[in-house]
Image (cartoon, rainbow, N blue to C red):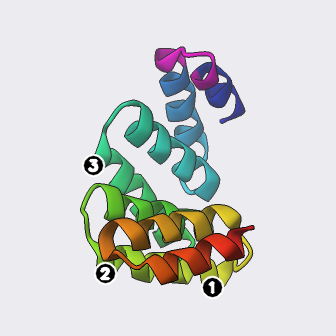
Amino acid sequence: RDAARHFEEGGDEAAALRHYEEALRLTPHDVPTLNSVALFKWDVQGDTKAAERLLGEALRVSPSDPLALGNLARYAEEVQRDADTSQTLYKKAISAEPQNPGLLSNYGCMLLALRSDKAGAADCFLRAL
């Protein structure tokens, strides 16, 4: 997985993909690997269906993993535009890691984007500091 990130950061998407696929082959139930590959598929390749499948697998392996919950919440927000699902997932993620500034910031952004909840978003942003 580290090699894949190295190639991804260097802009070599093909090499990154090969290394991510190898990491998945070697550790198919490793939650950090599932998350990393899901984000690569989504953010770099635009393959939202593969990302959803991999994030779902990460949650099946570890149902309370805050990173997987947060990534799936972001997916529900940005791809599905599903405020209810996104909010539920963010709340679960934040209850697992209440001081995680990334989760709090992303949740605040979702509250603004899909709920127009300025007060709730401001609270999240302040807690993220």
Asked whether 13 falls inside the magenta stretch, the response is yes
Compare marks 2 and 1 and give the one earlier in the sequence.
Answer: 2
Residue 88 drawn at (x, y percent)? 42, 83
Asked whether 91 falls inside the magenta stretch, the response is no
Return the mark for residue 95: 1
Name the dominant secondary structure of the magenta segment. helix
Compare marks 2 and 3 and give the one earlier in the sequence.
Answer: 3
What amino acid is found at the position of numbered circle 1 in the picture? Answer: Ser
Task: Name the residue that disc number 3 marks.
Answer: 49
Please give left or right for residue 118 compared with residue 45 in the image.
right
Secondary structure, mark 2, is: helix
Instruction: State the separation of the CA atoms marked 3 and 1.
Output: 27 Å
Secondary structure, mark 3, is: helix
Extent of the magenta region: 8-15
What residue sits 58% from the left and 24% below the top? Answer: 8
Quadrant in the picture for the C terminus: bottom right
Residue 83 drawn at (x, y percent)? 31, 75
Total tally of numbered discs in the picture: 3
Query: Nearest the camera: 30 or 74?
Result: 74
Secondary structure, mark 1, is: helix
What amino acid is found at the position of numbered circle 2 in the picture? Answer: Asp
User: Is residue 1 placed above or below 101 in the rendered structure?
Assistant: above
Query: Pointers 2 and 1 in contact (CB under 8 A)?
Result: no
What amino acid is found at the position of numbered circle 3 in the picture? Answer: Lys
Task: Name the residue that disc number 2 marks.
Answer: 84
The quadrant in which residue 127 appears is: bottom right
Residue 43 drawn at (x, y percent)? 42, 38
Query: Pointers 3 and 1 in contact (CB under 8 A)?
Result: no
